[in-house]
Image: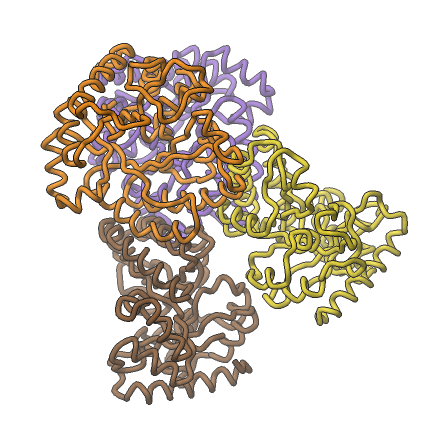
Chain colours: A orange, B yellow, C brown, D purple
Amino acid sequence: MLRGLTLNGLGAVENEERFIELAGAGGFRAVDVDARGLIERLGTDGALNKLQQHGVVIGAIGLSVEWRAGEDEFRAGLTGLTEAAAAAQSLGCTRCCTYILPSTDAKPAHFLALATRRLRVCAQILGAFGIRMGLEFVGPHHLRTAWKYPFIWTMEETLDWIDAIGEPNVGLLLDAYHWHTNGLASDDIKRLQAQQIVHVHINDAPNLPLEAVRDNDRLYPGEGVIDLEGFLRGLQHIGYDGIVSQEVLTPDMPKDKPEQLIRRSKAGFDRVFAAAGISK
Amino acid sequence: MLRGLTLNGLGAVENEERFIELAGAGGFRAVDVDARGLIERLGTDGALNKLQQHGVVIGAIGLSVEWRAGEDEFRAGLTGLTEAAAAAQSLGCTRCCTYILPSTDAKPAHFLALATRRLRVCAQILGAFGIRMGLEFVGPHHLRTAWKYPFIWTMEETLDWIDAIGEPNVGLLLDAYHWHTNGLASDDIKRLQAQQIVHVHINDAPNLPLEAVRDNDRLYPGEGVIDLEGFLRGLQHIGYDGIVSQEVLTPDMPKDKPEQLIRRSKAGFDRVFAAAGISK
Amino acid sequence: MLRGLTLNGLGAVENEERFIELAGAGGFRAVDVDARGLIERLGTDGALNKLQQHGVVIGAIGLSVEWRAGEDEFRAGLTGLTEAAAAAQSLGCTRCCTYILPSTDAKPAHFLALATRRLRVCAQILGAFGIRMGLEFVGPHHLRTAWKYPFIWTMEETLDWIDAIGEPNVGLLLDAYHWHTNGLASDDIKRLQAQQIVHVHINDAPNLPLEAVRDNDRLYPGEGVIDLEGFLRGLQHIGYDGIVSQEVLTPDMPKDKPEQLIRRSKAGFDRVFAAAGISK
Amino acid sequence: MLRGLTLNGLGAVENEERFIELAGAGGFRAVDVDARGLIERLGTDGALNKLQQHGVVIGAIGLSVEWRAGEDEFRAGLTGLTEAAAAAQSLGCTRCCTYILPSTDAKPAHFLALATRRLRVCAQILGAFGIRMGLEFVGPHHLRTAWKYPFIWTMEETLDWIDAIGEPNVGLLLDAYHWHTNGLASDDIKRLQAQQIVHVHINDAPNLPLEAVRDNDRLYPGEGVIDLEGFLRGLQHIGYDGIVSQEVLTPDMPKDKPEQLIRRSKAGFDRVFAAAGISK
């Protein structure tokens, strides 16, 4: 497993080039950045050099297509998706992720039908560039009733949706926070196969009843009550050898300097990986 | 368009062989029967002879697979589906239909994900035998709230679901009753292409506010308030040349003799087809 | 059926704007042009106005993606395809076509495997924009042995390939020349369903044994020996209501003025459509 | 990796029940048998007991559908496939395999188009029962020209075909003999991902030029010149944890007693697994 960072939880980092430098200097080996933007600013060779120089790879790009709104918005994003996919491929990145809100004001079956077709098209385009697509289920209970109807929030539902999409390159983005708020255990991960997981997010949660845990109130790995040892042991058990990226969403941007926050993150990773008996 | 019958609305017909005889004698050219059962009783040649002798073809078979319950029930039906599809093909039948209940106690997005995969498998098996699969949306308002959550009941939703299923041999079963209770007009049919329609049901509705029309309270074609002239003109306009089968669901089985009910049906067909200017 | 033109056979037409003017003035209702280029020069509104002003629609765009060479070339074309598809859609065009060379120096089964995946991706992208993809089989015998191994040249093979691609929006481009050089008859068209045909090319062939007919030695409709009456009657019979575009490939560009060549084309269309009893 | 046997190379074993007993007694943990036949003779519980009692699981069943001949033969096998898949699932077997002849008398592109559609249907049916489908490429050079045209024989071609089939549950059956006769190395396996391999065959080859190695002239593992150490190290490297089944095709059935042949097989497995540093 490769330890990675997202910008969420790092405070005021100037830009993604600086993010790359800080991540590398802080002992991380992967960053979730916008491959296409990086190439636009640095060129492909410049971007590759930047990454290599700081010893990091790109973990995942975000799915830029608007698949939740109208058909026009969806179509308007497809050219950008081909460009983003080509950019990601040229920088060696093989993952693209999006998340699923657990409730919706739309009629949920119809919305899922539309989204199935749209995400299939996205997966097909990404697949042409050798990129896998990860779907992140979102567990916090308050979001399950934030909109009128329930949508999708469990791992099982998400796996069934992935089957409905039906493309070989689609899998899960497994986030420790959503695993925790779904009440899942290490054994639930052990029932998966490694290739069903496209990407992993790590973070921690406050000591609250599961129903009260809020989505944007996350802690750094090892600073909360999530069983991250079990989480990582589960991943290790099934042979997951991809990236584990920190994602700490907070109500306000942390005020500490990025260097400090990365040190704190590093300490957290070290603690939980050691607890899980994972040396690398 | 070929005029056909289902057993619904014909009273106490002894069996499907008798149904074939009555339909042919009554001036109808298609019957919706169980092809497999017919072959089991008469043999393939016997079944073909029976149909030919009475001048009828099989309109559509019903989808025998249980796609709405658990995975085991679903799988248990697949062998029967291959046999039913082979039987249908050997009797020249190219349509297989199922209907969609408009509400559900299950989480609707998850149920749609499961059903998308299952119906895709059914379509793939049917497709191997040259058979198309028709999905019937169900319009009556009381069924939209009969279970906890809304599911799928409009033509647009159904077309979007067909896209999500993603197999070339899937289309609509368009039923006049559901078209009526959805408040659709002739123009809504004219926006379709003929090949999007796998099968058509015809019947009529009492003169009630749309919200009060109940699913099993149907009338014979031409005896109610549905704009069947507009319905048929729409189908004619787009070049639909398939089958139009009567389906009259009633609270109790009609007590008249089947011969009488078929004459009544024939008179209704004659009236509404004439009104639509369709000679054959 | 809408009568249309391609640039092949019209001599030295300055550009596609001029082509639109000439086609409209000459009594044709469709042109096969590059929608994206038109929009780049005139803007979307300007392009729409131009087409409307001259009473023509766009018949089909060409598939811009290189699907026959290496993987890099293929991928490099996908951004352009999304742009071309968006352009076509914004001008009301719903067809995109490519042709199949009947022999190949590559191992043919492997090449077909690669091409199946690539054309599926193209169809999926086009489908997101409501555009169908037409595959044109190429009949002339000399091309069947122009490269080392036989590939695909019959209508049946092409239909089977379309099934292998497996997307609902893929069909045939039926060209009279290839129908003729395959020795096909009107009945072969009558066995099709209208929706299996995405686009139609019309032209004529010299009075030679089929084996000697060369691909780029075509005549104007009605000036040769192809049974265009049977060809058009077949299309009429199955209810094809799309576009029939002239495509006359010749060893050298015709020297007559475009206006003359279009009059000649118009006379040919009039003759063969009249022979087939098709008034519009 | 689980060590398994096929009947090929074991001489005159009375039946599959006896095969299960011999394999278990001989220290093997998997057998490739006909799950459906086993259940027909022993019942599901009886078959499960038999397997459990002798400490073996079913490695893979063979694909019973005739996908290489006409459409009628293909369709006629689909009912049997659903039954075979259900039987396999009920006995815990998750693999079904077929092989690809490297040349063909049919036009190869057309044959691949037909076979792509047919194998996709098979994969879809198997997938409904949680079963993966493995395609075995066949390397011996004499078979590449045994029929008129080249078809598919390399690993790369097969992977490209699997992409063309496009179902998530399709992968390779990797046979050491075909890997050897294709001139592949350990590194070629290391470039794969474990989930691309559905099943593995092991055996050995005589010391002949690659071009002269014949398909049915195989040796027991460790008795020939195939780099089985590199083969197994490659599988180990990518985390393959499935089954490795011996398949020794010979011109005549070996005359030794099955017990002797299994001991010989066991000694070969022990030797090559030890050489590869694989303890279990």
For this rendering, which residue is in front, C158 or B31? B31
Location of residue C278 (image quadrant): bottom right
In the image: residue B196, left or right of residue C161: right
Give coordinates of residue D130: x percent, y percent. 48, 30
Which residue is rendered at x = 22% and y = 49% of the image?
Answer: C72
Image quadrant where one finds the C terminus of chain A: top left
| Residue A271 placement (x, y as % from top left) | 24, 12
Q: How many marks?
A: 0
Q: State the residue in front, C261 or B140.
A: B140
| In front of the other: D52 or D251 | D52
Q: Is residue C252 left or right of residue D58?
A: left
Question: How far across and down, in percent of the image, does residue D260 sit?
Answer: 38, 14
The N terminus of chain A sits in image quarter: top left
State left or right for residue D44 relative to residue B180: left
Q: Position of residue A251 (x, y in %)?
A: 33, 27
Q: Is residue D81 visible?
A: no
B143 is higher (above) or lower (below) than C66: above
Camera-nearest residue between A176 and D168: A176
**Which residue, as the protein is rendered here, is positioned at the far right?**
B256
Residue A50 in sight: yes
In the depicted structure, whether residue D87 falls above or below residue B128: above
- Residue B227 appears left or right of C68: right
**Where is residue B232, by image quadrant?**
bottom right
